[in-house]
Amino acid sequence: MINSIVGENTELTGNFKIEGVLRIDGKFEGKVDSKNQILIGKKGFAIIEATAEEMIIGGYVEGKVKVRGKFKVLETGFFKGEVDAERIEIEAGGFFSGKFRTKMLEKKND
């Protein structure tokens, strides 16, 4: 259940701690510490430093992200930055530019 939304016509800047799911469909710049998901809609634009359980990107995101579970870029998504995640998925058509580190790679290299 989504309990925090940055709507399409909203521009928001700040630092947030969120227990539930955050969906960004507008413009956001700042830090987010979420114990759940961060979802970036197709029209969402974020310059973000984030920690979350899971992150799914359908819009434009630049930043540094730490995800305890899955980091996913949808076919409409764009990500530029750094990711530290358990798993990373990029759909065909999705864009990723930057660095990533997964715990799965670390386990294979042990």
Image (spheres, grey):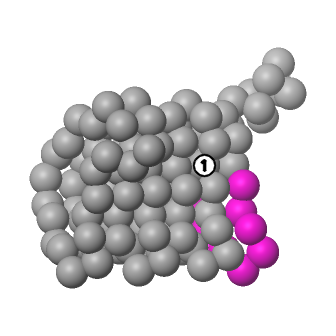
What SS does tag 1 mark? strand
Horizontal arrangement in the rendering, residue 45 relative to residue 94 (left or right): left
Mark 1 neighbour density, 10 Å: few (under 14) some (14–19) many (20 or more): many
Pick whichever, 43 or 2, lies toward us. 2
**Principal secondary structure, stretch drawn in magenta:** strand
Q: Is residue 95 covered in magenta? A: yes
As drawn, the residue found furthest toward the right would be 108
What residue type is disc 1 on? Phe
Which residues fall within the magenta stretch? Answer: 89-100
In the image, farthest residue toward the front: 1
Evaluate whether residue 101 shows in this view.
no
Q: Please indicate whether residue 89 sits to the left or right of residue 19 in the image.
A: right
Q: Residue at x 38, y 58 (%)?
A: 23
Residue visible at 17% across and 45% down? Answer: 15
Q: Position of residue 72 (x, y in %)?
A: 63, 55
Q: Residue at x 54, y 42 (%)?
A: 54
Residue 94 is one of the magenta-drawn residues: yes
Residue 42 position (above or below residue 63)? below
Q: Quadrant of residue 12?
A: bottom left
Tell me: 23 left or right of 6: right
Residue 45 seen in this snapshot: yes
To which residue does mark 1 refer?
A: 71
Question: At x 86% / y 27%, what residue is drawn?
Answer: 108
Percent coordinates x, y for residue 65 in the rendering? 45, 47
Q: What is the quadrant of residue 13 in the picture?
A: bottom left
